[in-house]
Image (cartoon, grey):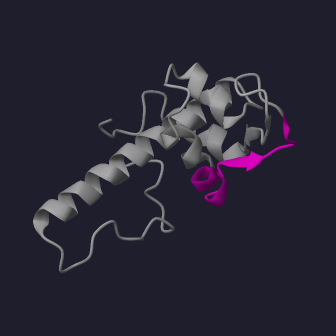
Amino acid sequence: MSGGLFDGPRRTYQHARVADPETSKAAGKKWQAVGGAAAETALRLLVQSPGRTGAELNELAGRDPSSRTLPRRLADLAADGFVYRGTPRACHVTHETATTWWPLPKGIAWIDAHPEGGGREA
């Protein structure tokens, strides 16, 4: 996962305990890869179309509107300095007030440096 979006020092939490069976550890690694792929998708969409809500990003990605995998990664991206929360507005998908998300220079630079993706399997 060299060059992955979440390869930095902040991503040190465990998805399985040391004493867990190997199957749990494998599932934890898969979960981290899925979350990283969703975060990368969200960041790419924001760079291309900034100021979207989580539901709007889901729609742009062609995902089921009820899917929460991609929108949930936005807070992770914000915590790592790739995006920031903008002014809430009416979402074009849900018609409810929702937070908008905007890429920061660090996020744009990451996308520019990884035009074909971060090397993860989805």
What span is in magenta? Answer: 75-89
Q: Residue at x 74, y 30 (%)?
A: 50
Please provide percent x and percent y for residue 52: 73, 30
Is 9 drawn above or below residue 101 in the view shown?
Answer: below
Q: Is residue 10 magenta?
A: no
- The single residue placed furthest to the left in the displayed view is 22
Is 30 drawn above or below residue 10 in the view shown?
Answer: above
Please provide percent x and percent y for residue 105: 72, 44
Residue 15 appears in which quarter of the rendering? bottom left
Q: Residue at x 83, y 44 (%)?
A: 86
Residue 44 appears in which quarter of the rendering? top right
Is 60 drawn above or below residue 28 in the view shown?
Answer: above
Q: Nearer the viewer, residue 45 or 105?
A: 45
For the C terminus, which image quadrant?
Answer: top left
Position of residue 31 in the picture relative to residue 100 (left or right): left
Position of residue 13 in the picture relative to residue 1 (left or right): right
Q: Residue at x 63, y 43 (%)?
A: 107
- The single residue placed furthest to the bottom in the displayed view is 19
Q: Is residue 84 magenta?
A: yes
Q: Nearer the viewer, residue 15 or 3?
A: 15
